[in-house]
Image (tube, rainbow, N blue to C red):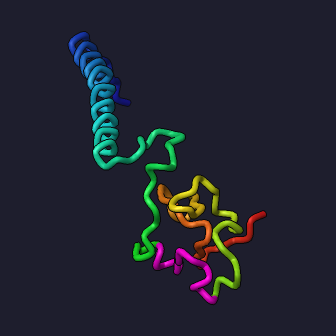
Amino acid sequence: MIESKMNRRGFFSTLAKITGVAVVAPAALSAVFSSTAEAQKKRGGAPAAGGAAAGGMPMVDPNDSVAKAVKYVEDFKKAPEAKGNDCMGCGFYAKKEVRNGKEVGTCTIFAGKLVYGQGWCASWNKKA
């Protein structure tokens, strides 16, 4: 069995390292989060903190790879397979606001982006 005894020098060396991490980590994290907030301000978006206003969220681009994979369309009437269903009737959709006279909301399929309420995709799931 190997005995591990920490001598006085080892103890203070370890203590200094732990203290250094405790002092540097919050400053580093603060710098990361403030630079993220600054970048979002420059783009004109809302901060990423919880409860962010939907006004700063971008709309889903129908040409996005995820949108194409689920066959997202901004107008359900243009997708015969929608069978009259739209995002407003989907369990993944939550209304947020009105943009350019059209209802928009969040969708769990497209994290951080908004979809049109009159949109549709192949992941449509009837609202409970």
Q: Residue at x 40, y 73 (%)?
A: 64
* Residue 117 percent coordinates (x, y): 61, 66
Q: How many marks?
A: 0
Towards the viewer: 75 or 67: 75
Farthest front residue? 101
Q: Would you place residue 55 above or below residue 77 in this image?
A: above
Residue 48, position in %: x, y?
Answer: 43, 43
Location of the N terminus (image quadrant): top left
Please name the residue shown 30% across and 37% down the image.
32
Residue 19 is situated, as x and y percent measured from the top left of the image, at: 29, 18
| Residue 25 on the magenta segment | no
Residue 82 lies, with reference to residue 109, above or below; the image says: below
> Image height check: is 112 above or below 11?
below
| Residue 11 shown left or right of residue 65 in the figure | left
Image coordinates of residue 124 in percent, x first then y, are 65, 73
The answer to if 72 sits in the magenta stretch is: yes
Residue 85 is left or right of residue 37, and the answer is right
Magenta segment boundaries in residue numbering: 67-80
Farthest residue in the top direction? 8
Along the viewing direction, whichever of 120 and 21 lies nearer the viewer: 120
Residue at image location 64% in from the left, 57% down from the top: 94
Q: Residue at x 74, y 65 (%)?
A: 127
Q: In which quadrant is the C terminus drawn?
A: bottom right
**Residue 16 can be seen in this image:** yes
